[in-house]
Image (tube, rainbow, N blue to C red):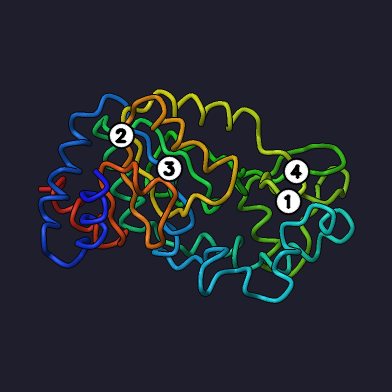
């Protein structure tokens, strides 16, 4: 198994044996009872969104760690809104990648049952996926920190792009996105749903994540421990590579090939 895993990763995109690996991936998908996708930042870099810890990641920018610091937000929310102006509030201009589109198509055919994502860019929903579990929260809703009133992303984005801090129309309190900031707990309901899906999965696609952020990184382990198969597609090595049924290194090449197989 380890030899097969290493060979798949080395061959992805080179032609040697790659077609056989794609055929095996298709077979795994079509024979699965409950397939779940687990996605990280690498999926969205294909859409032009910077990741966090990569070579050109967001955290290479000076003071970028302050963007999602809850203490900084509470003392001066303008820091978040200034730094997130393009990163979060320019999302409407981003287009789903081939990975987002393929997962949505597989869901429409009853193959992928859910997408668990660490991302906060709403691209899975834009691509058409309907069961998306956002374990790091979502900017789709912004809430007043004073009265709790909820506002849609479009309202907050319009204000944020103008350079101002979005505020509640009822009490003038600052709006905070439902994104999990550092110092906040992960959303209990989303984590519970993700764990249930991970344990129920007989196949999990681990896409664009190096599995270094916990507790999210423990979800594929739950699938493996429950007897499910793991497929890893990620440029960098992961801790689960040795347990993966298939291992590919290039997301775009792999999903371009898969999309060609599942569309007329």
The residue at the point 34 percent across, 48 percent down is 232
Task: Tell me whether circle 1 and circle 4 mark residues in contact (CB < 8 Å).
Answer: yes
CA separation, marks 3 and 4?
22 Å
Quarter that holds the N terminus: top left
Can you tell which mark lies on residue 184? 4
Whole-percent x, y for residue 241 in the image: 36, 49
CA separation, marks 2 and 1?
32 Å
CA separation, marks 3 and 1?
21 Å
First in residue order: circle 3 vs circle 1: 3
CA separation, marks 1 and 4?
6 Å
Can you tell which mark lies on residue 38? 3
Q: Which type of secondary structure does the marked residue at label 2 adopt?
A: strand
First in residue order: circle 2 vs circle 1: 1
Q: Which type of secondary structure does the marked residue at label 3 adopt?
A: strand
CA separation, marks 4 and 2?
32 Å
Tell me if 30 is positioned left or right of 247 in this view.
Answer: left
Task: Tell me whether circle 3 and circle 1 mark residues in contact (CB < 8 Å).
Answer: no
Q: Would you name the residue on which mark 1 appears?
A: 182
- Closer to the camera in the image, 214 or 77: 214
Are there few (<14), some (14-19), or many (20+) residues within 10 Å of tag 4?
Answer: few
Q: Would you name the residue on which mark 2 appears?
A: 229
Whole-percent x, y for residue 166 in the image: 76, 56
């Amino acid at each position: 198994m380890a030899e097969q895993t290493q060979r798949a990763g080395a061959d992805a995109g080179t032609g040697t044996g790659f077609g056989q690996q794609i055929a095996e991936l298709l077979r795994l998908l079509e024979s699965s009872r409950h397939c779940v996708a687990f996605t990280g930042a690498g999926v969205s870099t294909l859409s032009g969104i910077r990741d966090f810890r990569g070579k050109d990641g967001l955290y290479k920018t000076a003071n970028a760690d302050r963007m999602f610091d809850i203490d900084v937000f509470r003392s001066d929310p303008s820091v978040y809104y200034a730094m997130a102006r393009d990163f979060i509030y320019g999302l409407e201009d981003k287009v789903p990648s081939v990975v987002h589109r393929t997962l949505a198509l597989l869901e429409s055919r009853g193959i992928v049952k859910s997408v668990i994502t660490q991302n906060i860019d709403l691209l899975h929903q834009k691509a058409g996926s309907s069961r998306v579990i956002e374990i790091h929260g979502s900017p789709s809703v912004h809430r007043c920190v004073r009265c709790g009133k909820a506002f849609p992303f479009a309202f907050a984005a319009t204000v944020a792009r103008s350079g101002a801090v979005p505020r509640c129309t009822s009490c003038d309190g600052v709006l905070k996105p439902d994104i999990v900031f550092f110092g906040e707990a992960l959303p209990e309901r989303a984590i519970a749903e993700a764990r249930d899906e991970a344990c129920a999965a007989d196949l999990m696609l681990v896409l664009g994540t190096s599995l270094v952020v916990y507790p999210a990184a423990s979800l594929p382990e739950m699938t493996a421990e429950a007897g499910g198969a793991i497929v890893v597609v990620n440029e960098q090595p992961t801790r689960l590579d040795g347990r993966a049924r298939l291992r590919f290194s290039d997301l775009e090449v792999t999903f371009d090939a898969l999309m060609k197989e599942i569309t007329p």
